Image (cartoon, rainbow, N blue to C red):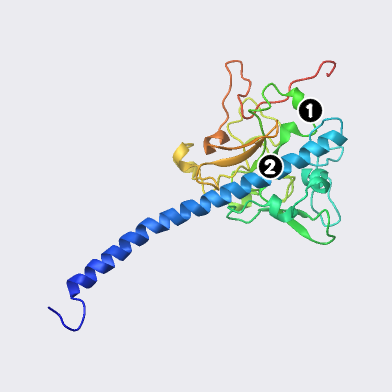
Amino acid sequence: MNQLGLTKLEKLAIAVAVLAVIAVLIPLYRQLVDLKYTSDCLSNLKEIADAINLYQLDYQNTLPLAYYANPDGSPQLDSQGYPLTWVLCVSSYLRKDIQRTLRCPADPLRGSTLISHPRERGKTLQISYGFYAPLSGRRVEDLLNPGLTVMIADSVAGGQRGTLNPLPLLNGNDGFLLGYDDAPFFPTAQSRYITRLAVWRLREEDGWREGNLRAFHGKGVNVLHADGHVSTRSPTIILLEREPDGRLKPPWSLPQKREGEP
């Protein structure tokens, strides 16, 4: 017996045991952090949903504008050169810390779009949530499946940061719309996927496979549906699926024309 302390074998056994415990605790810690971030993000979306509901009460039951547009369709800019977005529509209805509400805690870019702070002159906000462009200024009753239709989702903006956004409206600091790979507002017959979702480090050369989609959260993309409820969806929702007649399937349903509209 070693009278001076542990033997080498005993020290090795302890070291192996410690490493085994660490190997178990690190993934568990990461899972707990992800659960916390996911919960906080969904709470943000619920706060945004409440603000949108209040906005609808004041504006004839219409949804916010994705962004304020000039007659030619380009975004209106404020004095700081940033677009006027849906955040301006709902900011006065947000009760909590507006910056915390608009930034997903799991966003690796800490909010990739900058806009002017609607309450504090000269300051900016970093946003982690994008608005689905076809729902801009529309009524929920225009949708066939509002409970299945995504209105706002975890997002990154600006193709210059390695995301899937090929058509920024304004040098990456756009109106933060969830558009399409070949069109910023409404899909074409060739549109394949939604841009600006919380999918990053996707390697296009490997093809559009589910395993290549990396969301902010372990279980997928957090979304706010048009009927006001929130959920976590698989990142495969970035891909567009269509009915036999070519219509988009949920969650990217398009508004239906109202009676009397051209």
At a point 86% along the width and 40% down the height, the residue shown is 70
Image position of 173 with respect to 238: above or below: below
Q: Nearer the viewer, residue 87 or 185?
A: 87
Q: Is residue 64 visible?
A: no
Q: Residue at x 41, y 58 (%)?
A: 26
Disc 1 versus disc 2: distance between alpha carbons? Answer: 19 Å
Say which element carries label 2.
helix
Residue 236 in the image, given as x and y percentages of width and height: 52, 35
Mark number, residue 46: 2
Neighbours of disc 2 within 10 Å: few (<14), some (14-19), many (20+): some
What residue appears at the point 52 percent right and 54 percent down from the top-left corner? 33
Q: In which quarter of the view is residue 165 placed? A: top right
Q: Residues within 10 Å of mark 1 (few under 14, many from 20)?
A: some
Of residues 205 and 229, the one drawn nearer to the viewer in this rendering: 229
Q: Quadrant of residue 72?
A: top right
Q: Residue furthest left?
A: 1
The tag on residue 139 is: 1
Which quadrant is home to the N terminus? bottom left
Please state the horizontal and vertical placement of residue 125, each as a whole percent of the image: 74, 56
Per the rendering, the mark at residue 226 is: none
Along the line of sight, which residue is nearer the eye, 9 or 130? Answer: 9
Q: Amino acid at mark 1?
A: Arg
**What SS does tag 1 mark?**
loop
Q: Quadrant of residue 49?
A: top right
